[in-house]
Image (spheres, grey):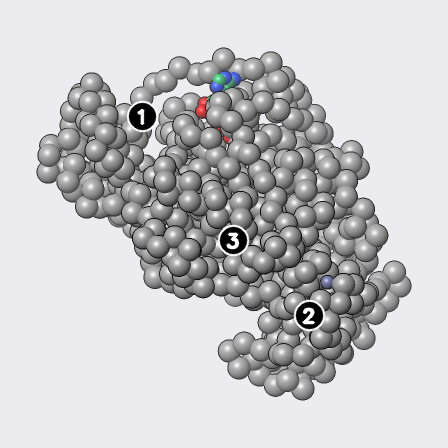
Amino acid sequence: MALYADVIIDLSSFRLDRCFQYRVPDEYRDSIEEGSAVTVPFGKGDRRIRGYVLSLTDTPALEESRIKDISGPDTDAVSPDDILIRLAGWIRRNYGGTMIQALRTVLPVKARSGVRVRKLVSLRVSQEECKEKLSECEKKNWHGKARALSALLENPSVPYEMLTGKLHVSSNTIQSLKRSGIVEVSEKTGSDPGFLDRVGEKERPALSPEQEEIISGISDATVSGEPGRYLIHGITGSGKTEVYLGIAENLDRAGLQTIMLIPEIALTFQTLIRFYRRFGDRVIVLNSSMTPGERFAGMEKARSGDAAVVIGPRSALFTPFPKLGAVIIDEEHETSYKSQSPPRYHTRETAAELCRMRGASLVLGSATPSMEAGYGVEKGEYRYLSLKRRLTGGTLPDVTVADMREELKNGNYSPFSKVLQERMRTVLERNEQGMLFLNRRGVAGFVSCRACGYVYKCPHCDVSLTQHGEKTMRCHYCGHSEMKPDRCPKCGSKYLMGFKAGTESIEKKVREFLPGCTTIRMDGDTTSRKGDYERILQKFADHEADFLIGTQMIVKGHDFPDVTLMGILAADMSLYTGDFRGGERTFDLLTQAAGRAGRGKNPGSVVIQTYSPDNYAIMNAASQDYSGFYEEEIKYRSLMSYPPVGHMLAVLVVSGSRERSGEISKELAAAAAGDGINIVGPAPAGISYINDRFRYTLYIKSPDYRKLTEARDRCESRSFGLDLRDTEIQYDFDPVGGW
Ligand code: ADP
Ligand code: ZN
Ligand code: ZN
């Protein structure tokens, strides 16, 4: 059968809707794939020009005789853009979605840079006066002003948005500082952040021997043409960012550029300033609040070779640097590195492919490496490097695990264990602050015994069952369901319940327990409007509440020096989410949450409440033992063939009709079946009905990733013949988070 390629010709105008079809000569069948650059005859004189393959098909779109042959692969196509287009082809093959979606992901939209006005807050008084004012504010407990002044002491000009955003200073506070003549607010247009001319110099710390060795090891290998893959394991404050800076600097000296990826929420003003100090205006910063024009301007600057480093969230991976030296992924375990809309690519794996194509090094950094990274080390694909000491001083908090089964036995029916109650009182007495964390994920409610901790699990999938309605429990992977019994099969207790605590009821209980205390709640309900999130954090930072109660939102990247207590109310809620990543998420969350307490002068304490005190994720999080956790978790993944040991493709079918959704998922299951493939489901999705639409999922498992992409291709071919009215099908490889 003949093979035809839809080719885009003109990259400069990048009209994705304008393709030309060519025939692929047999000799090039194996070397041409989606994303390949090719030479084709074009126009009247059959001028030879470059084009890119958008898709391949065996059905000609026009009369056979009018279709010309591709002249051949274009081997000169090695510019950053050519490589990004090839990478788009790789993304499309490995994660699904359409080639157009993949191209839109890797290539920035061409847009004119709109003029945008930025406000800048600058110090109008001397450093000495600023210091005096600062200590005055601290004495008077003017927390907001104090935070603004310490930032200005660090750097005499700070972007307005940085103060109100990352540093939780309210606009009223800035106004008040302005009125008293301490700061001025000016406006600046253009794309540079506007304060570079005033970035102060600062002495660099002398590197530790460990840091020195990691930096020179990675940069020497990269510069001498032997790029590698590395995992840097080190707790917060162990000097990882200093290592990233050192690598980028060495690569820059050799004329190579660095892509630095960071979860957006984790990019602090202090980190940005460190990069600006080192590289001046040769740093490009990308973030989600930028306009397409600003983004495009950043990409142009990268292309010109005038920049040394780009810092940004996962999309910064597609920065078209002329000579890429390294991609660094900080906090690589973060789930925001997995795209949640098509193409659902994994940043880590995509970065590895990009580095392979461009001869660059890949550097991962984390305090709690993902199972994927840990397994990569075990298989010898990554070199393991570690930074063991905390350089910032401060003691690690003291962690207590509270066994909630014992509390029940002793007649304590409140959501707070005795030890947590005691610590909460202490916080109030000492006028410190506490955070209460309800690690709720999604809406799933598992069923467990409050007396002995027994959790109902699927006999086939070894994940927790989820309560549906009053009486049934169901597995989200295979659909296995059982009746909810009246008594616990292990201990006979009748305290058997779906776990459904909400932040709102917890807040009420805190106020009942400690009358007169003040609380703020942060969850999906209280942060639905723009600016809510910042407002809540500002209030808490200004000490307007003794306790902050919330979901995972409160755990990430905030420094509140007066927080001395972190209470994790129900560690089990992230453990039993009905998917295979529950243990890993719990270990990350608990380790991070523990790191929130005791950042300031006073030592911190952490209370982890659980019905499963013997669970290895909880035990190892309490003792901060990553390798202990990894060893146990990889056994489970391996036994059940879950990623990263095996691979898994989730297929979601969403339809306005329940019957159609169910039938299509059955058809797809039949189409996917094949050698070396294990099919689980189809079954109603975790959220099986939302916005008047019915959702079914199907899980396809195989030790071999390629078998999954082939199964996906079979599903796609089959879906063309199905009645897809009001129906959509989505593919998710090695899913992170559930449906
Ligand atoms: P991480 O990225 O692991 O959290 P950082 O690189 O931010 O760690 O380092 C934590 C703090 O320690 C920073 O304030 C940094 O300036 C400082 N620091 C880093 N390396 C050294 C060093 N070798 N000696 C002294 N201080 C250091
Ligand atoms: Zn029991
Ligand atoms: Zn199951």
Image spot of residue 412 (x, y percent):
56, 57
**Can you identify the residue that label 2 sits on?**
494
**Can you identify the residue that label 1 sits on?**
154
Between disc 3 and disc 1, whose residue precedes?
1
Q: Is residue 522 left or right of residue 322?
A: left
Identify the residue at horizontal 84%, vertical 63% (top origin): 677
What is the spatial separation of the Cα atoms under label 2 and label 3, in whole angstroms?
21 Å
Task: Examine the image and state in which quarter residue 196 appears.
Answer: top left
Please tell me the numbered disc located at residue 416: 3
Between disc 1 and disc 2, whose residue precedes?
1
Identify the residue at horizontal 70%, vertical 25% (top origin): 226
Q: Are marks 3 and 1 in contact (CB under 8 Å)?
A: no
Name the amino acid, label 1. Glu
Characterize the local packing of mark 2: few (<14), some (14-19) or many (20 or more) Cα atoms within 10 angstroms. Answer: some
Between disc 2 and disc 3, whose residue precedes?
3
Give SS at disc 3: loop
Image height of 282 relative to 345, above or below: above
Image spot of residue 286 (x, y percent):
42, 43
- For the question of whether residue 314 can be seen, the reply is no
Mark nearer the viewer, 1 or 2: 2
Task: Examine the image and state in which quarter residue 431 appears.
Answer: top left
Image spot of residue 527 (x, y percent):
38, 59
What is the spatial separation of the Cα atoms under label 3 and label 1, in whole angstroms?
41 Å
Characterize the local packing of mark 3: few (<14), some (14-19) or many (20 or more) Cα atoms within 10 angstroms. Answer: many
